[in-house]
Image: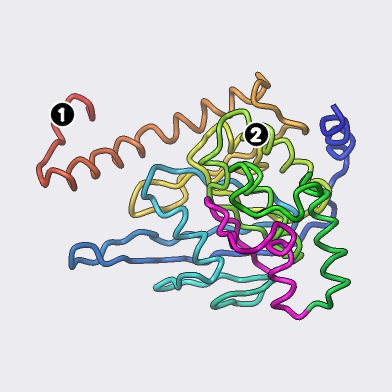
Amino acid sequence: MYIQAELVIAGEKQVSNKSHILEAKNIVKHFDHNGESMLALDGINFDVQEGDFVCIVGPSGCGKSTFLNIIAGLEKPDSGEILLSGKPISGHDAKIIMVFQEGALFPWLSVIDNVEFGLKMAKVPKNERNQISQRYLEMMQLTKFANSYIHQLSTGMRQRVAIARALAMDPDILLMDEPFAALDSQTRDMLMVELQLIWQRTKKTILFVTHNVSESVILGDRVLIFKHRPSKIKKEIRIDLHRPRLAEDENLLHYTHEILGELKDEVKESIKDEVKESTKDGYEDMELFN
């Protein structure tokens, strides 16, 4: 009840005077596939305003994670550019932090040491590191586990640590690559509520990749639908609903059905390609794809 009540209050707050913080301009990316060049991203263009919560959905293998990696500086596009606050970026930028599906935590470090790791590498003084880490441990309800090790935590708690570590770096943009994919439904629903609360508190700009359409509708103010390879943005859908948004909210169904309708043909194409790749045979005439 506490989380929900605070979200209702936070939901009344509006981010004013928004400016473009991130722009993708004609991002193209090829991959080598069995000795042949395969076009993965075919000119991705969009912009993100400060404080936006943008979700990206699309069929498996369409390049969602690749695109996020390009923004994070983990991969380079073949052409096009990413602009951060109007300036081109290449390589890693400390203002952009990624949260991965598996958390990418250090098992030999305690929870608090994991949260402080980036700050330590940035040579933030110890007392300041501790104050910052305690703030985000409290926000993620991890204070009692500060001295625990990763193997002692549930999968959901590990993701809380990963999010706390990312937030501790005070990024301008938080990238999240299917961070809830490995969680059970109850834990995922709880973390989706908590992530909305964190977003309202911190006003961070978030780009969130997911396969889960319901997840995208609950979390995103904008949902970008990626086509199957070569990937482009097929459609953008804006979710004009107040928070908190809960999984059982019937007002979300309209948006869920709209996104599923846009994805139907893209998923079919993805499955056809997977079948062709695994069998090296043509299945265009199979009833499944007609």
Which residue has dot 1 on it?
A: 286
Residue in front for this viewpoint, 171 or 164: 164
Quadrant for residue 169, please give it.
bottom right
- Rendered residue at 47%/30% (across/down): 260
**As rendered, which of 178 and 145 lies closer to the eye?**
145
Which disc number belongs to residue 218? 2
Q: CA distance from mark 1 to mark 2?
A: 35 Å
Residue 127, located in which quarter of the rendered image?
bottom right
Percent position (x, y) of residue 165?
Answer: 70, 60
N-terminal of the pair, mark 1 or mark 2, is 2
Which residue is pictured at 58% across the width and 75% down the height?
92
Magenta stretch: give its range.
Answer: 95-123
CB atoms of marks 1 and 2 within 8 Å: no
Q: Is residue 192 above or below residue 186?
A: below
Q: Is residue 272 magenta?
A: no
Compared across the picture, whether 117 is left or right of 80 comes to right
Q: Secondary structure at mark 1?
A: loop
Q: Nearer the viewer, residue 28 or 147?
A: 147
Task: Report whether 273 appears left or right of 213.
Answer: left
Residue 73: where, in percent of width, then height?
A: 53, 71
The location of residue 146, given as percent across then percent down, is 76, 54
Nearer to us of marks 1 and 2 is 2
Q: For the point 24% across and 43% down, which residue is it?
A: 274
Q: Which mark is residue 152?
A: none
Is residue 172 found left or right of 37 in the rendered image? right
Quadrant location of the C terminus in the rendered image: top left
User: Could you tell me which quadrant the N terminus lies in?
Assistant: top right
Number of dots carrying numbers: 2
Q: Residues within 10 Å of mark 1 (few under 14, many from 20)?
A: few
